[in-house]
């Protein structure tokens, strides 16, 4: 298992953002759905080793992130796209991706080829020498994805990766996700259920810091049968699970 | 892959540079310091370079602009842009993204710091090179002083390190101006206490301080005591700031309230190294501060640190360069060789009037400032006539200040020599209770004043102001005009016959021809 979470919680003051989540994830694409404030971003930040949990155990890529040496090894094999991508406007696309490749401790000899591949995979080859300040929001998002995948990660964490992408780019991105999920564990946090349906082999639904559903997209669709709220089958499943969870029971 | 990408990433036909070098190159390429470069260049040309070229072409004098002019010009730029670079991760909100990378935050922060520092030092050294190259083209003795350059570079490094760390700890768009202004205020205050000699160690540690005594670097070696202490202190400050950067929770990757031990990318080893660097830095700065506290004023070096002071006060051997006529040779230190012709010319007229008179100097020799009596400094003169046969011993420093006007330059020598021959000593130093030593002028009696001023007037030099009651002043001026109107031969003949009586005070104003 690339991700093993045992009853992890994370609090910010009195607010419990993640509440006793246990999860095991292997290779494939896991979509994490949930309403605003459900704890998706906090969960991803803990998986990204940015945020230590308040309690519980995390093992990533068979390593313990509490250990400095093991955390460093995890980070070498980790890709992360945060919800709000910060960037250096004066850097070019290639420089920005190269910067992260170097910081991820990639062997210097491999960096040029890896950067070129990552930039191509997000379809930014034609803008490789453009400064980031000249790019649109969607292009910046793709730059963020490029830096996340540049080290060919075994664990890829993407927080709202398709925000700002046009429909054509989203289709391309979903294909990229499926491709990456062949060998790596990809965790995608999103509001967009159609992304999950199209690209994810598994889906987890969070509400109030807990995972209230885990299964395949088809299983989520099944949960929505007969449910009135929602335009698409998966949206109906999403609403049904949330409604059931809020009535008191955890559906998973 | 497109051609653009292939070109952009340089396929590996040659061995790639080490990681840190590649990141450093990137940081140098993107350093915002270049934005401030045009203004700094204008400042440099307008202030330090113009000042240096206006100075006489003496290495020690020209080198003073490095620390007293150029260094303070660089400080706000270095501080502001370093703080801006330090705050970048916080301002650009890339902290989460960077925190997931394998390399310790300290590595990338030091690369970013290095990018700014490289520009700061390059600009500083380029400015110094411009001043030194210009000086090298005309200087006749000595070589470029290294200590001011070393002190300036180390102190600028400390400023950058401190500002960068402050920027990293308190990121925000206002941190750069706040740090730039704050550090500039500290530098100006340190300069003030340095110049007023009231600040103890702070004044000694200020690179932007008082000008060393004129003899330093020409007649006597420049004592490196203060420079050594400054380098120790600023090297310590640099290490302290860099260590603090490594210990900072922000750079460690957990935010203020996170547990550093749990999430710092560098872990225990990095913290140990950072702590050690911080401790060494603080200790070095403490040693520097402590040594600065032992400083004492010195005649030659300006300031001495007893613990470091060697036998640097032995004079530097030199062979004087001489010019002028056989009857009145003029000798200068070789550093002033460029002024020999002008100096010889300055004595020509006055010596044509005084030659052969009792007490008239037979030659003029430049000596170290410290070899002259305090009375010379008291009245702002250039030298004194001493010894048998009489020799006019003088310094060039006061006269050099008058260089832009060759007439004033000549006046200062003519007044000195004529006063010494006709009146005697220019004055004496007396101790005023509660005040200290003060200069008491000896303008001479009315007849002496009339003859002296008449002679100066005759050779076109600036006479001394007549002293005494108002009516007597007018009489002195009238008698001086009368004496000046005589032919040179008549004046000289009268002086030959009457100088002894005149100096003894036995000649009245009415007896002046």
Image (cartoon, rainbow, N blue to C red):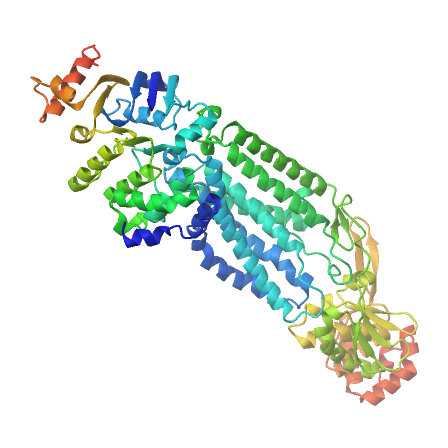
Q: In which quarter of the image is the C terminus of chain B?
A: bottom right
Q: Position of residue A124 (x, y in %)?
A: 26, 47
Up the image or down, A241 lies above or below B274; here it is above
Q: Which residue is most to the front?
A: B13
Up the image or down, B340 lies above or below B217; here it is below
Q: Nearer the viewer, residue B192 or A160?
A: A160
Q: Position of residue B126 (x, y in %)?
A: 55, 60
* Residue B332 falls left or right of residue B236: right
Q: Where is residue B139 in the image (x, y as percent from the top left)?
A: 67, 69
Q: Nearer the viewer, residue A96 or B133?
A: A96
Q: How many labels, in total?
A: 0
Q: Determine if residue B208 is in view.
A: no
* Residue B117 falls left or right of residue B154: left
Residue drawn at point x = 40 percent, y = 52 percent: B13
* Residue B457 falls left or right of residue A64: right
Up the image or down, B137 lies above or below B47; here it is below
Q: Which of B169 and A93 is in front in this view?
A: A93
Q: Where is residue B317 in the image (x, y as percent from the top left)?
A: 81, 64
Residue A239 image-quadrant placement: top left
Q: Determine if residue B12 is in view.
A: yes
Residue drawn at point x = 48 percent, y = 39 percent: B107
Up the image or down, B250 lies above or below B228; here it is above
* Residue B434 falls left or right of residue A76: right
Q: Nearer the viewer, residue A207 or A237?
A: A237
């Amino acid at each position: 298992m690339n991700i093993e979470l045992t009853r992890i919680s994370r609090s910010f003051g009195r607010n419990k953002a993640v509440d006793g989540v246990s999860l095991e994830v292997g290779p494939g694409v896991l979509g994490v759905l949930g309403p605003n404030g459900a704890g998706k971003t906090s969960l991803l930040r803990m998986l990204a080793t940015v945020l230590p949990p308040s309690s519980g155990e995390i093992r990533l890529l068979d390593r313990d992130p509490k250990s400095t040496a093991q955390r460093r090894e995890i980070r070498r094999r980790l890709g992360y796209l945060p919800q709000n991508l910060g960037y250096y406007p004066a850097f070019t696309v290639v420089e920005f991706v190269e910067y992260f490749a170097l910081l991820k401790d990639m062997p210097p000899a491999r960096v040029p080829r890896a950067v070129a591949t990552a930039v191509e995979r997000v379809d930014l080859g034609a803008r490789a020498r453009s400064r980031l300040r000249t790019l649109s929001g969607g292009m910046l998002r793709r730059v963020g994805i490029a830096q996340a995948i540049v080290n060919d990660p075994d664990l890829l964490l993407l927080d709202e990766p398709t925000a700002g992408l046009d429909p054509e780019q989203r289709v391309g991105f979903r294909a990229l996700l499926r491709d990456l999920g062949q060998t790596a564990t990809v965790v995608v946090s999103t509001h967009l259920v159609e992304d999950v349906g199209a690209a994810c082999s598994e889906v987890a639904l969070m509400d109030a810091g807990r995972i209230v559903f885990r299964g395949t997209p088809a299983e989520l669709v099944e949960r929505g049968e007969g449910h009135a709220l929602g335009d698409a089958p998966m949206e109906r499943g999403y609403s049904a699970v949330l409604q059931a969870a809020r009535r008191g029971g955890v559906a998973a | 892959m497109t051609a653009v990408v292939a070109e952009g990433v340089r396929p590996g036909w040659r061995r790639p540079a080490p990681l840190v070098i590649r990141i450093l190159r990137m940081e140098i390429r993107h350093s915002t310091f270049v934005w401030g470069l045009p203004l700094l260049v204008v400042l440099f040309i307008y202030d330090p370079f113009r000042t240096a070229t206006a100075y006489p072409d003496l290495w020690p004098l020209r080198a003073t602009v490095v620390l007293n002019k150029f260094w303070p010009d660089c400080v706000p730029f270095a501080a502001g842009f370093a703080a801006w670079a330090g705050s970048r991760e916080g301002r650009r909100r890339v902290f989460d993204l960077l925190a997931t990378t394998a390399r310790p935050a300290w590595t990338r922060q030091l690369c970013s710091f290095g990018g700014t520092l490289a520009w700061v030092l390059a600009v500083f050294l380029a400015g110094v090179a411009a001043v030194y190259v210009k000086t090298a083209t005309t200087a006749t003795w000595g070589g470029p002083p290294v200590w001011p350059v070393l002190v300036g570079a180390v102190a600028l490094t400390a400023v950058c390190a401190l500002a960068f760390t402050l920027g990293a700890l308190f990121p925000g768009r206002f941190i750069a101006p706040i740090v730039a202004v704050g550090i500039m205020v500290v530098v100006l205050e340190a300069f003030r206490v340095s110049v007023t000699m009231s600040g103890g160690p702070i004044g000694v540690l200020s690179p932007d301080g008082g000008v060393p005594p004129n003899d330093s670097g020409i007649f006597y070696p420049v004592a490196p005591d203060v420079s050594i202490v400054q380098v120790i202190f600023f090297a310590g400050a640099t290490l302290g700031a860099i260590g603090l950067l490594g210990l900072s929770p922000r750079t460690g990757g957990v935010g203020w309230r996170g547990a550093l031990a749990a999430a710092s990318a560098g872990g225990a080893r990095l913290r140990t190294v950072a702590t050690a660097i911080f401790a060494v830095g603080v200790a070095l700065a403490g040693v520097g501060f402590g040594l600065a506290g032992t400083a004492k004023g010195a005649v030659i070096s300006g300031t001495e640190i007893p613990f470091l002071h060697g036998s640097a006060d032995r004079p530097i051997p030199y062979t004087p360069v001489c010019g002028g006529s056989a009857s009145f040779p003029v000798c200068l230190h070789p550093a002033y060789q460029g002024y020999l012709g002008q100096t010889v010319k300055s004595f020509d007229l006055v010596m044509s009037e005084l030659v052969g008179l009792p007490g008239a100097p037979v030659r003029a020799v430049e000596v170290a400032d410290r070899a002259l009596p305090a009375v010379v400094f008291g009245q702002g003169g250039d030298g004194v006539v001493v010894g048998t046969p009489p020799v006019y011993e003088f310094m060039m420093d006061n006269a050099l200040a008058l260089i832009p006007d060759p007439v004033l330059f000549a006046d200062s020598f003519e007044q000195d020599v004529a006063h010494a021959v006709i009146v005697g000593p220019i004055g004496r130093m007396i101790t005023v209770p509660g005040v200290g030593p003060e200069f008491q002028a000896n303008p001479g009696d009315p007849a002496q004043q009339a003859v002296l001023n008449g002679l100066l007037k005759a050779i076109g030099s600036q006479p001394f102001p007549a002293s005494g009651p108002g009516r007597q002043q007018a009489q002195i001026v009238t008698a001086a005009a009368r004496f000046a109107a005589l032919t040179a031969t008549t004046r000289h003949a009268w002086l030959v016959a009457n100088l002894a009586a005149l100096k003894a005070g036995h000649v009245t104003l009415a007896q002046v021809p």
